[in-house]
Amino acid sequence: MGQYTVLIISENQADHLILGQCLQRATPKRFQLIVPESMERPVETLLDPAVDAVIMAMGAETEYLLRLAQKHDSPTPIILLLDEENYPQIEQMRDLGARDYLLRSQLHDNLVHRVLDYTIRLSEAEHRIQQLSHRDSLTGALNRAGFRAHLERAMERSRRYGFNTALLYVNMDQFANINDHYGEADGDLMIKTISRRLLNKLRSTDSIARMGADEFAIVLEDVASAEDVQQIAEKMLSSIAAPMILSDQQVSIAASIGAAIYPDDGQEFPDLVECARSAMQQAKSISGSKFVRFSEQLSFDHGGNSTLAAELRNAVRKNQFELHYQPRIDLGTGRLVGLEALLRWNHPERGLLLPREFISACEDMGLLKTIGYQVIQHACSAQVWMEEQGIHDVDVAVNISFTQFQDDPFVSIVKEIIKRTGCEPSRLEFELTESTILKSPEAVQQRMDELRLLGISFSLDDFGTGFSQLSHLTELPISALKIDARFVRDLPHNAHQAAVCNMIIEMGRRMDLLVIAEGAETYEQIEFLRDNHCQQVQGFYYSPAFPLQQLPRFIQEQHYKRRESLIP
């Protein structure tokens, strides 16, 4: 157990004395109470990195100090010291960022120690979650949100100072074969190695982001010419292709790089991204490691095939998107209790494509709403089909993007789909991410309330990765939390991931929310989650996503395995 520094802000010297003695009696000794020398510079006091928690006596300056801490994103939890329980006032202070409260009449040692321990540990876990949410957990590179922010800042600097910024899209060729032949652990090792190699080719002003399982985006600021970009890209290709050791074997992989340059190829974020992706797709059509710079001539290749953008528009028109379903299992009974609908593109030439290969392009092109309604339609039809097959009491979960959720006719279209398909809305679940809620909490809540009246339930997907305010959990009609796969990946051996999982499970238990873990792949992970009272789980340990027609066979296999005690 660590040593914690607790700052007390109170003009009442009795508070200092009572709390000081209380913290000194803690066993083991872990608290040090300090008093600010002066409150003339309150920002410096509240943002002091050496402070683990603040106990603040309620007074005339309390609201001002809480707003100040909130404005400057102070990570230090604040606990109020009150004379009495005034619930409207407490709720108001919580809205301003206060984490908890103590009553002067109830400063018992055990209570004070427990409140401080819980508050500080929760704050530490949230801090770890925030760090993870900005970075790819495997490589340490930026994630998609970090990439967008960095590229937009780079484009703004380019506008201001008049230099060029290049965007490279890097995709590994035939990476799926690596996972198939060597396993996911070696596949992860390859991606980490490639990430380090690419990082070694960058300057301090450049950045790298992992955009998908086998795809990176690289932002190069202040590039002199297209020729310089090509030289950098060719060095990257050579570095990627250098052999590496996987499972005692020498392995190498080729890559494709597409480039677009701001402002020549695109002056807005979606345009520049689409140009770089189009160039990368063109590079993939050429055998071997290769680099292609975007040009208008890439709109069509020599055979007249359309670019990714045109292919996606055609896919929407021809309904080439389909759903595969990943089972959700109750850890107590081992039975199927839900399915998550996952989008796939049945490409006429390239076969079945995963969302990482096209979803960001759909978002940039404004196609997500149209595709999203198709997904809801298919999911509702799937629920009806299951009932016809005698498969009852199975929820169907659908991921809903912010773009779709804020669409004005969203509720009326969902009502029409439910009416047309005849599905049972109480078995329909919409999965929202924290980032979706954070963009417009009040509007999202209003829409959720409308949909809840239809019987639809809501889960918070990838919980922890968006670092939302915990108050949303009490204000919004959320019935389930989904632990993101990145917090399950290295269980039970990664202490930080174990701490985050336990925190989410305990939070769900206290708030009477269902907790579902994603990405479980091993028996050890399943056992850890069960032992720590996680209710449901999904992941490759039970099954990858599959077409709906395979569901009866999966249920039969599960029944057999439970009967023979082959699975927990």
Image: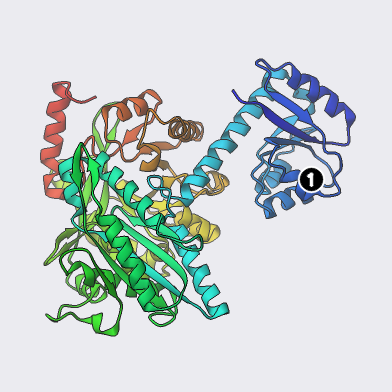
**Could you tell me the amino acid type at mark 1?**
Thr
* Disc 1: which residue: 62
Quadrant including the C terminus:
top left
Q: Does residue 510 appear to the left or right of 103 in the view shown?
A: left
Kind of element beneath mark 1: helix
Is residue 492 among the parts visible in the rendering?
yes
Q: Which color scheme did the rendering employ for the protein?
A: rainbow
Q: Is residue 22 above or below residue 339?
A: above
At 45% across and 46% down in the image, what residue appears? 478
Q: Does residue 39 appear to the left or right of 74 in the view shown?
A: right
At 43% across and 42% down in the image, what residue appears? 479
Q: Position of residue 490 (x, y in %)?
A: 36, 34
Q: Position of residue 466 (x, y in %)?
A: 48, 50
Q: Position of residue 420 (x, y in %)?
A: 24, 62
Q: Does residue 372 appear to the left or right of 502 in the view shown?
A: left
User: Is 172 or 233 nearer to us in this picture?
Assistant: 233
Q: What is the crowding at mark 1: few (fewer than 14 residues within 10 Å), some, or many (at least 20)?
A: some
Q: Is residue 125 above or below residue 265?
A: above
At 70% across and 25% down in the image, what residue appears? 31
